[in-house]
Amino acid sequence: MEFLLDANVAYVLLVVGTLLILMGLLTPGTGIFELSALFALVLAGYGAYNLGINPWAMVPLALALVPFLYAIRLPRWRTVLLVTTILLAMSGSILLFPGEDGRLIGVNLLLAGFVSLTASGLLWLFVERTLTAMMSLPTHDDHHLIGQIGEARTDIHDEGSVQVSSELWSAKSTAPILAGRICSIM
């Protein structure tokens, strides 16, 4: 576990854990992102405990959640809010681990830039794709069936089944319809 006592490793684990938390906020209930975030953050916490941190650097990390949560709800301001989230998270995570001999930054800046840009791109892509999927209309909306022609697969009186465009749908009718009959969906 000696490798966890490197500020660069702790930084990468912290960024990965934070990214997974944000992804977990978008897809609650799966548990995959949440458990992975917990694992990464426990390892980053071990490194932070042994390396020490700049406590004031936690402020931008905590503040990064505010614009992120608003970005989910406000599509008009999403770009500005996501950029703000990314900048706050990057600055807080880069400044979190103090350097040796009293230096402000203990993380390799090239590594920090690469990891931050990669995580930012992944976060951006994940947020955009997830929100697009969440806001899209269902492709199997039963309102599109109205006016189409189908074939009764079972006898339909109160309830039954009808085949429309290679899909089987539940059907109701006040008048009896025999199985195999062609009918119009209303």
Image (tube, rainbow, N blue to C red):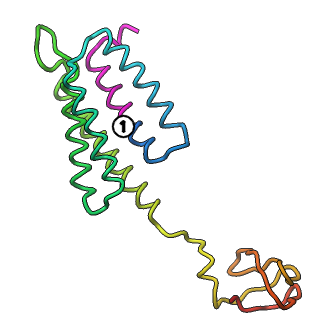
Residue 105 falls left or right of residue 23: left
Q: Measuring 31% from the left and 8% from the top, which residue is drawn there?
A: 50
Residue 15: x %, y % from top left = 32, 31
- Check disc 1 and report its element: helix, strand or loop: helix
Residue 87 falls left or right of residue 41: left
- Kindly identify which residue carries mark 1: 19
Which quadrant of the view contains residue 65? top left
Say above or below: 163 vs 29.
Answer: below
Which quadrant of the view contains residue 154? bottom right
Q: Measuring 83% from the left and 77% from the top, which residue is drawn there?
A: 160
| Dominant secondary structure of the residues highlighted in magenta in the image | helix
11 within the magenta span: yes
Residue 183: x %, y % from top left = 76, 91
For the image, the number of numbered tags is 1
Label 1 Cα crowd, 10 Å radius (few <14 / some 14-19 / many 20+)? some
Residue 1 falls left or right of residue 182: left
- Amino acid beneath label 1: Leu
Q: Measuring 46% from the left and 60% from the top, which residue is drawn there?
A: 133
Front-most of residues 132 and 28? 28
Q: Measuring 40% from the left and 56% from the top, which residue is drawn there?
A: 129
Say above or below: 155 vs 87.
Answer: below
Location of the C terminus (image quadrant): bottom right
Residue 101: x %, y % from top left = 11, 7
Location of the N terminus (image quadrant): top left
Residue 24: x %, y % from top left = 45, 41
Residue 121 falls left or right of residue 24: left
Residue bounds of the magenta highlight = 1-19
148 within the magenta span: no
